[in-house]
Image: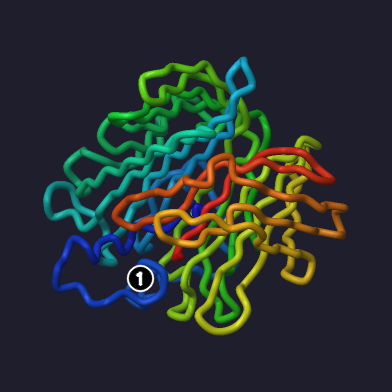
């Protein structure tokens, strides 16, 4: 949702770790804090591309989030994650140099059935270490890159990251339209009105190479891009989320998220995406999302198998984690990894769980 990866999770409030005097954050990683000085998210925005692929000054948090479900020629399954977060320290137009009030955070990970590796990078804005350019499109932090030379960036992309235990270089292509989530891109996160602007490209096809623990694999498979920006996507009562992106073998796609609360029922919604890219918002009463088996991961009990029913779409499926130990042991830890889909529909996808 990434909320990317919500992403995965927004770095915004990693910044509590950059300032020892920062107050205790409210909601998951501070995402429920008041942000009155920043630009609010309101219904009715008219999106403009390619400019909306770039950064949005005035909003507090933002992310570019990619996941890929990959196979090698022998049928082995892998997952890849790449996320760039932008967090504004102040609501102002960003200046070049060290006076810049933006902090950038990168997350990258690879997962197989037996291994999971994650890494993070930090950068201050304004000095060239990280950022986003619109034309030609490039999002980067250090040598991690998500870039395109195409006039329509989302038609042809290059994605790369590396760390001590892993590396990947992927080529992503799509001829399908992107998808505006929620109400024409206005994605509500609570009954109180917290929201983000949110669009996706769920139709990417990826191919390239992946390296884990010194072993190199040739891989291919579907990939998913999430783009979100906001200033306060959670309430102080919300503790985290469970986010799903699913590539069904029928050609359809599903995005769901459940925003858990300290008190009361979770806020649940999603999107059903047809094979030709038509999107329909799913209301909570249309969705049955139930955690099933749990696993002990990093001292926490994590739901690594779920059932999902959407009767209106004749969907009745089980999701199981490719690797239950896909724990992102980073500054703000969370669970993120590929899942397998079985039942009325086959497929694969990604699951992110935060705030546990």
Q: Residues within 10 Å of mark 1 (few under 14, many from 20)?
A: many
Where, by quadrant of the figure, is residue 339 drawn? top right
Residue at the spot x=59%, y=45% of the render?
321
In percent of width and height, residue 172 lies at 54, 27
The image position of residue 269, as x and y in percent, is 67, 65
Q: How is the image coloured?
A: rainbow
Secondary structure of the residue carrying tag 1 is: helix
The one nearer the camera, 58 or 232, is 232
Left or right: 213, with 237 as reference point = left
Residue 352 placement, left or right of 99? right
Of residue 347 and residue 268, the one placed in the foreground of this image is 347
Residue 251, x across and y down, in percent: 77, 36
Q: Position of residue 140 (x, y in %)?
A: 33, 36
Q: Is residue 157 above or below residue 139?
A: above
Give the residue at mark 1: 30
- In the displayed structure, 328 sits above or below 138; it is below
Residue at image point 72% right, 70% down:
284
Q: Is residue 251 above or below residue 30?
A: above
Give the camera-side residue of 52 and 24: 24
Quadrant of residue 165 within the rendered picture: top left
| Quadrant of res 198 | bottom right
Compared across the picture, whether 318 is left or right of 21 comes to: right
Residue located farthest toward the left when viewing the structure as drawn: 98
Labels in figure, total:
1
Q: Residue at the location (23% across, 77% down)?
A: 23
Position above or below: 313 against 141: below
- Residue at image x 77%, y 50%? 317
């Amino acid at each position: 949702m990434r909320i990317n990866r919500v992403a995965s999770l927004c770095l915004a409030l990693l910044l509590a770790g950059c300032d020892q005097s920062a107050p205790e954050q409210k909601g998951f990683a501070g995402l429920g804090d008041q942000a009155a000085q920043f630009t609010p998210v309101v219904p009715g925005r008219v999106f403009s591309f390619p400019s909306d692929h770039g950064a949005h000054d005035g909003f507090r948090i933002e992310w570019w989030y990619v996941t890929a479900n990959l196979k090698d020629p022998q049928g082995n399954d892998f997952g890849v994650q790449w996320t760039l977060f932008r967090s504004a320290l102040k609501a102002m137009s960003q200046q070049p140099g060290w006076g810049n009030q933006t902090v950038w955070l990168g997350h990258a990970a690879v997962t197989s059935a037996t291994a999971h590796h994650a890494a993070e990078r930090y950068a201050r804005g304004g000095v060239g270490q990280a950022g986003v350019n619109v034309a030609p499109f490039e999002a980067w932090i250090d040598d991690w890159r998500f870039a395109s030379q195409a006039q329509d960036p989302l038609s042809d992309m290059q994605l790369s990251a590396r760390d001590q235990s892993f590396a990947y270089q992927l080529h992503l292509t799509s001829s399908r339209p992107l998808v505006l989530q929620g109400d024409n891109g206005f994605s509500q996160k609570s009954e109180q009105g917290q929201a983000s602007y949110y669009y996706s490209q769920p139709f990417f096809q990826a191919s390239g190479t992946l390296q884990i623990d010194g072993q190199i694999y040739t891989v291919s498979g579907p990939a998913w891009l999430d783009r979100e920006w906001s200033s306060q996507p959670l309430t102080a009562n919300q503790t985290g989320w469970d986010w799903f992106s699913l590539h069904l073998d029928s050609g359809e796609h599903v995005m769901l998220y459940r925003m858990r609360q300290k008190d009361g029922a979770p806020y649940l919604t999603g999107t059903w995406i047809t094979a030709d890219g038509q999107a329909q918002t799913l209301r909570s009463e249309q969705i049955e999302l139930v955690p099933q088996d749990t696993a002990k991961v990093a001292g926490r009990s994590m739901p690594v198998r779920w059932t999902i029913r959407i009767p209106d779409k004749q969907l009745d499926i089980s999701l199981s984690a490719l690797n239950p130990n896909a724990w992102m042991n980073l500054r703000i830890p969370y669970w993120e990894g590929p899942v397998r889909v079985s039942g009325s529909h086959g497929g694969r996808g990604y699951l992110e769980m935060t705030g546990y």
